[in-house]
Image (cartoon, rainbow, N blue to C red):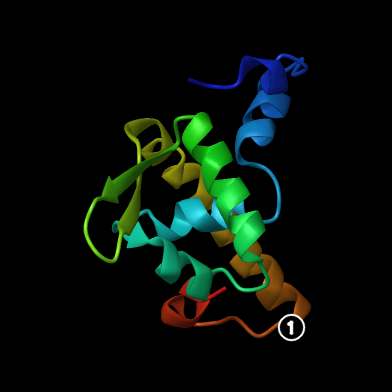
Amino acid sequence: MIKIKRLTAAKCPVDYAFQRIGGKYKARILWLLKDEVRRYGELRRYVTGITPKMLSQVLRELEDDQLITRTVYFEVPPRVEYSLTDTARELIPAIILISTWGHEQMQHQGVEVMQETEAEKM
């Protein structure tokens, strides 16, 4: 269930949306999950600059907001996988637009643009 208390302060749709997907890591995690299910360790490798504690917190928030699903496999060693919900899949076109805009801005500013495989390891 979405944590209503955190989102009730939103006064407009943009504020509401960014409370759910804003921040340094959420959109990056959603982008990494757009094409495939990923395990916790993969996300740790690909999202650079994030501590294990912060990654766990961000994943919990995305799960609380019903944007990702967490599947636990009770085996030894335990395995946890994350995937997008249908609601999060609706966000992917918006993230693609932001990515396109960012790419254009990087080129305009003379910033080196990474290849897709390198960008996954952000």
Q: Nearer the viewer, residue 8 or 102?
A: 8
Mark 1 crowd level (few <14, some 14–19, many ≥20, 10 Å Cα):
few
Pointer 1: what residue?
Answer: 110
Q: Nearer the viewer, residue 63 or 104?
A: 63
Q: Residue furthest front?
A: 76
Question: Which residue shows up at 53% across the image and 22% down it?
Answer: 2
- Residue 114 drawn above or below residue 122: below
Q: Quadrant of the C terminus?
A: bottom right
- Residue 88 drawn above or below residue 15: below
Q: Is residue 37 left or right of residue 13?
A: left
Question: Which residue shows up at 56% across the image and 68% down it?
Answer: 47
- Residue 106 drawn above or below residue 57: below
Which quarter of the picture shows residue 68? top left
| x and y percentages locating residue 112 in the rendered image | 65, 85
Question: Which residue shows up at 30% across the image and 45% down it?
Answer: 71
| x and y percentages locating residue 99 in the rendered image | 56, 59
| x and y percentages locating residue 78 in the rendered image | 30, 60
Q: Is residue 119 left or right of residue 92?
A: right
Question: Which residue shows up at 69% across the image and 32% down it?
Answer: 19
Considering the numbered disc 1 on the image, is that residue within a helix, a strand or a loop? loop
Which quarter of the picture shows residue 54? bottom right
Q: Amino acid at mark 1?
A: Gly
- For the image, the number of numbered tags is 1
Q: Nearer the viewer, residue 9 or 2?
A: 2
